[in-house]
Amino acid sequence: MYRLLLSYINTSVCSWSLTFIIPLIILDVTGSALYVSLAYSVSILPYIIITPIAGAVGDSSNKKHVIQIGEILSAIIVLLIPLVDLTVDNIWYLLMLSFLSSCTSAVHHPIFQSIIPNLIEDEKIPKFNSFVHISDNIISISIPVVVGMFLLLGTKIDLIYIISFGYLLSFVLVSSIRYTPDKVIDKFSIKLIINSTKDGFCYVLSNNTIKYAAILFFGVNFGIRIFYANFVYHLSSDYSLSDSEISNYFSIIGLGSIIGAIFAAKLIGRFENGVIIIWSTILTAVMSLLVCFSSSAIETIILWSISSLCQSIIIVTFFTLRQREVPPELLGRTVAVTRMISYLAIPIASISGGWIMDNTQNFNNIALISGLVIFISAILCMSPLTKKQMKRVVD
């Protein structure tokens, strides 16, 4: 268990560091906010385009081998970055490498999630998912600080080489894990991948629990992303906070996420998963709506920290539900399809949120939309996600 978790943490550190450092390199070269925004957009695209295919590849092959290949490819892609002549005319090469690196990350997530039930005992899965989500939050909080400290001593290219080495270390860790695939595919073809991907979509559509959980996640992700996309601007312009103050406040939000991940492991098993997800979603919506009445930055941060706590509970609970509900041979594709659906909300939320802020200059409108979308999503999905649990109680 610990080697699997350590490999995940190591890969996540590399991925987060790369996502942070490439825009900085692009900013140094171009001095353009547009190019920086483009870099972030490019890094999101694979999670929408590649992820469904990745699930099919994982379910149709040896998951351990797919992860190993991904780590090696990531190391090679990162090593190509220093070879690019860093000029404005060549910035498209760097964006392409950023896209390819994000492709390997998009493949890694569904494969990693689907291999967990093969390697972790069923009763330990909630705890393991909790550790994974805690790790994600600690990494997201600490990477900007760690990268900033490193750049005081070294260069961005030095960090690129370290990231490449990190991917190789993940390859070694994964290689040391004992894993026997559920089945071996003799003939691996494009047709097989297409049919396999289609089966993944069909399964999600046919399983009411998973289907409505995916719909719920789309709504929750939209509400969260429309809020986050304008949150820094809100704290800076409406409350006149400095960059350092905003960073400190975001650390408080990250702490809420960590507490939520720990709390989730305690809730799972005591209450039905669907019930946990729905009520955590409703609380998330309430926190967004209460932001409309907030009169200070610290009140807003406290409310969103509670929201982040609830978000962590939703994520850990859903990951556990999905790993237990879905047959192992379909898990990779199911993870991929549900993740793709949730990521579709990101560009829609970001663009619409920016348009609303430009035209109204009132963050309360964003908080109101965020809360309403999340709340309506919870109400629409409440019956399908809790029906099975209610029937079980009656029986």
Image (tube, rainbow, N blue to C red):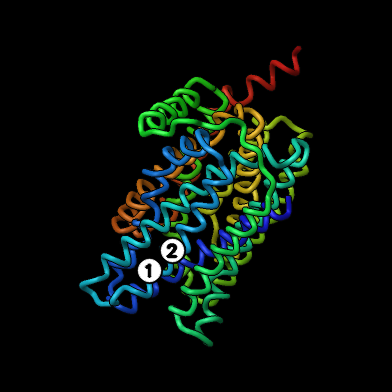
Asked which secondary structure carries label 1, the reply is: helix
Q: Residues within 10 Å of mark 1 (few under 14, many from 20)?
A: some
Q: Position of residue 347 (x, y in %)?
A: 36, 49
Tag 1 residue: 80
Residue 341, compared with residue 250, is above or below; it is above
Which residue occupies 59% across, 60% down? Answer: 170
**Amino acid marked by disc 1:** Leu
Q: Is any atom of residue 373 visible in this view?
A: no
Residue sitting at x 46%, y 66%: 18
Quarter where residue 167 is shown: bottom right
Q: Is residue 351 above or below residue 201?
A: below
Give the side of residue 22 with respect to residue 8, left or right.
left
According to the image, label 2 marks what residue?
A: 76
**Whole-percent x and y of residue 154?**
50, 85
Among the 4 quarters of the image, the one containing residue 250: bottom right
Classed neighbour count for the residue bearing mark 2: other residues with Cα under 10 Å, few (<14), some (14–19), many (≥20): some
- Residue displayed at 60% across by 28% down: 326
Q: Which mark is residue 255?
A: none
The residue depicted at 48 percent of the width and 53 percent of the height is 105
User: Which kind of residue does numbered mark 2 sit on?
Assistant: Ile
Q: Quadrant of the C terminus?
A: top right
Q: Can residue 95 be seen?
A: yes
Residue 324 rendering spot, x and y as whole percentages: 66, 31
- The residue at the far bottom in this view is 153
Instruction: Kindly check if marks 2 and 1 are in contact, taking CB atoms under 8 A apart as contact.
Output: yes
Circle 2 SS class: helix
Disc 2 and disc 1: Cα gap in Å?
6 Å
Q: Position of residue 129 (x, y in %)?
A: 67, 46
Front in this rendered view, residue 214 or 4: 4
Q: How many marks?
A: 2
